[in-house]
Image: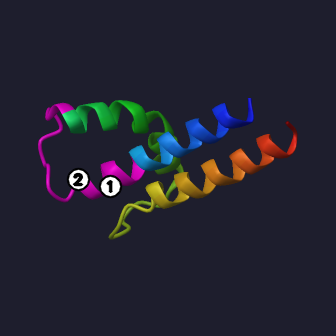
Amino acid sequence: MRSIIQATATVLIVAIIARALLSWFIRDPRNPLMDFLITITEPILAPIRSVMPRGLMIDLSPIIAIILIQVLTRVLLSNV
């Protein structure tokens, strides 16, 4: 169980980082790679964006999502 939680957290964090980095180079959301990354990460990032203040120069939702995933992983692993 421990390895499943860790692997899931790692995959999500890598997908979020990949999406953030590739968004600088791939502007077409219909690109198969971007479409895949958006499909995986949007359910995590959208709720965070909805509570973030509008008008920020940079999208901080990936950073917040990564922190939340790490905290949740530690909480789950402490109870396993």
Magenta stretch bounds: 16-32
Residue at 48%, 40% in the rendered image? 11
Q: Position of residue 19 (x, y in %)?
A: 32, 48
Residues at discs 1 and 2 in contact (Cβ within 8 Å): yes
Residue at 78%, 40% in the rendered image? 76
**Residue 70 shows which numbered tag?**
none
Instruction: Determine which quarter of the picture holds residue 15.
Output: top left
Q: How many marks?
A: 2
Which element type, helix, strand or loop, lies under badge 1? Answer: helix
The C terminus, quarter of image: top right
Give the residue pinned by disc 2: 23
* Relative side of 67 to 52, left or right: right
Which element type, helix, strand or loop, lies under badge 2? Answer: loop
Other residues around mark 1 within 10 Å, as few (<14) / some (14–19) / many (≥20)? some
Give the residue pinned by disc 1: 20
Instruction: Determine which quarter of the picture holds residue 21.
Output: bottom left
Q: Position of residue 78 (x, y in %)?
A: 85, 46
